């Protein structure tokens, strides 16, 4: 993966640009604001104290020999130009003649001591207000005039711009910072969006149980993760395909093997039947009965194995229709009645007069009951009991025995493929079976998953 495609490097580039741009943007914004507002704002005529002092002395000299009225008129003209200034003048006798504004707080008469004290108090660069004193005329006995300007009015243009528009500079810098935050948000939002897309693909399996591959748009870290995900999906699809092929081969092998075993079993059973007609000793008869029993057991196993293969592959014929449950249970148990009678079983059958119907395949339910009876015959002989009952109220079939239970040991216990077939068939018929088993026996209840049988 190239460095330019790395998410880490991309974000580090954003951080680096922010470090470079933020200080530069502050400087650039400040210069731009000062340049712009310096042309908009009028120059501050009060900011240069030296120029004010020169102007004031020049005007004072120009009033040499002027009358009181002329001096008043001149000072009023100056006041119009410098409207923030306070102005007054004192004649040669020490009497204050004019104050602008009129309410200006100054002495009406000035002694030499007061004059010197006033000049001392108003000297210095930090004294507020800024005070300029000039002697009127060319001679020292014509009086003096004073101009006072507040220090706040003497701020430089740049300082005034800063005080007046500093909030705009702050807003501009905040705007630049906001742009950087927005760019960072966009960066992480796109990452989050791609991760959510990947999570959605992982949690949305298709009909085959596997997620679809996703399109890889970029070659960064998330792109590498997407490629790995697609590779994983590809490997799972290949594994699933191999499993299907192996399952198909296994089912075909079981079907062929079951078919091939039936022929020799039929031949052996035929010869065993012929031997029964021959004169045999008691031991020979017992051996022949054992052979016949084992042949029947093996034939049943082969039949169950073939049925299991067909069920799991969905090829077992299923033809549902309305079935009278009471009649079917009665007919099915009637076929097994002599079998249990031969081994001295106590049989208890409770069938009601009314019935109910299930939408099922009757041959499938008969096969289910046969497998349960077969299981009782082989594994619950010690209990010597079987009970079959149809419960109209609960719409269920109940089969009970007094054997060692399904978890107990029996002489003929096998792999349990017969009961597996029972479970598969009931599931496909939308039925379920509840099993209560223990050392005292087993009770099996067969009923609809959602109820709703038709009752007559």
Image (cartoon, helix red, strand yellow):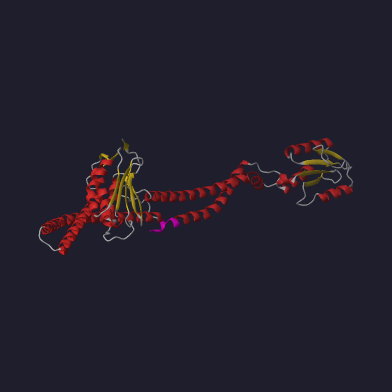
**Along the line of sight, the residue nearer the viewer: 206 or 414:** 414
131 sits left or right of 37 in the view = right
Indicate whether residue 3 is drawn in magenta: yes
**Does 369 appear above or below 12?**
above
**Along the line of sight, the residue nearer the viewer: 69 or 305:** 305
Q: Name the image quarter holding the N terminus.
A: bottom left
Magenta segment range?
A: 1-9
Residue 31, given in percent of the width and then of the height, sits at: 58, 49
370 sits left or right of 23 in the view = left
**Along the line of sight, the residue nearer the viewer: 202 or 156:** 202
Which residue sits at x=39%, y=51%?
198
Indicate whether residue 446 is drawn in magenta: no
**Residue 253 seen in render:** no
Q: Quadrant of residue 384?
A: bottom left
Residue 296, given in percent of the width and then of the height, sits at: 19, 56
Residue 56, given in percent of the width and then of the height, sits at: 76, 44
32 sits left or right of 413 in the view = right
**Does 230 appear above or below 62?**
below
**Along the line of sight, the residue nearer the viewer: 240 or 180:** 240
Count the labels in the image: 0
24 sits left or right of 293 in the view = right
**Residue 134 seen in render:** yes
Residue 397, given in percent of the width and then of the height, sits at: 31, 45
Q: Name the image quarter holding the C terminus.
A: top left
Q: Quadrant of residue 164?
A: top right
Which residue sits at x=74%, y=37%?
80
The prevailing secondary structure element of the residues shown in magenta is helix
């Amino acid at each position: 993966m190239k460095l330019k495609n790395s998410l880490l490097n991309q974000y580090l580039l954003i951080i680096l640009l922010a470090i470079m741009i933020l200080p530069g943007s502050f400087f650039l914004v400040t210069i731009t604001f000062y340049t712009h507002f310096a042309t908009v704002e009028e120059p501050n005529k009060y900011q240069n104290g030296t120029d004010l002092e020169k102007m004031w002395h020049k005007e004072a000299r120009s009033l040499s020999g002027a009358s009181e009225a002329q001096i008043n008129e001149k000072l009023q003209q100056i006041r119009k130009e410098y409207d923030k200034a306070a102005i007054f003048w004192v004649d040669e006798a020490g009497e204050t003649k004019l104050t602008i504004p009129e309410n200006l707080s100054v002495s009406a008469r000035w002694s030499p001591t007061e004059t010197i004290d006033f000049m001392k108090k108003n000297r210095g660069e930090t004294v507020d207000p800024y005070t300029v004193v000039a002697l009127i005329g060319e001679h020292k006995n014509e009086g003096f005039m004073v101009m006072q300007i507040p220090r706040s009015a003497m701020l430089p243009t740049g300082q005034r711009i800063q005080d007046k528009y500093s909030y705009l500079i702050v807003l501009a810098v905040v705007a630049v910072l906001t742009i950087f935050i927005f760019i960072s948000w966009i960066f992480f939002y796109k990452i989050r969006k791609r991760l959510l897309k990947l999570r959605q693909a992982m949690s949305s399996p298709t009909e085959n149980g596997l997620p679809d591959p996703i399109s890889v748009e970029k070659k960064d870290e998330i792109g590498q993760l997407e490629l790995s995900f697609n590779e994983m999906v590809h490997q799972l699809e290949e594994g699933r395909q191999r499993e299907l092929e192996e399952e198909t081969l296994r089912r075909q092998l079981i079907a062929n093997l079951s078919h091939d075993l039936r022929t020799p079993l039929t031949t052996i059973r035929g010869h065993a039947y012929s031997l029964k007609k021959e004169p045999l000793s008691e031991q020979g008869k017992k051996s022949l009965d054992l052979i016949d029993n084992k042949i029947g057991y093996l034939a049943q196993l082969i039949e169950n194995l073939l049925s299991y293969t067909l069920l799991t592959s969905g090829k077992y014929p299923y033809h549902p229709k309305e079935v009278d449950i009471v009649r079917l249970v009665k007919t099915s148990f009637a076929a097994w009645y002599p079998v249990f009678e031969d081994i001295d079983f106590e049989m208890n059958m409770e069938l009601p007069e009314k019935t109910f119907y299930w939408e099922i395949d009757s041959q499938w339910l008969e096969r289910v009951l046969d497998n349960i009876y077969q299981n009782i015959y082989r594994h619950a002989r010690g209990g010597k009991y079987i009970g079959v009952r149809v419960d109209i109220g609960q719409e269920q079939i109940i089969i009970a025995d007094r054997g060692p239970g399904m978890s107990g040991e029996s002489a003929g216990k096998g792999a349990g493929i017969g009961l597996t077939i029972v479970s598969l068939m009931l599931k496909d018929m939308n039925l379920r079976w509840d099993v209560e088993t223990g050392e005292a026996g087993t009770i099996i209840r067969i009923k609809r998953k959602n109820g709703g049988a038709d009752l007559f």
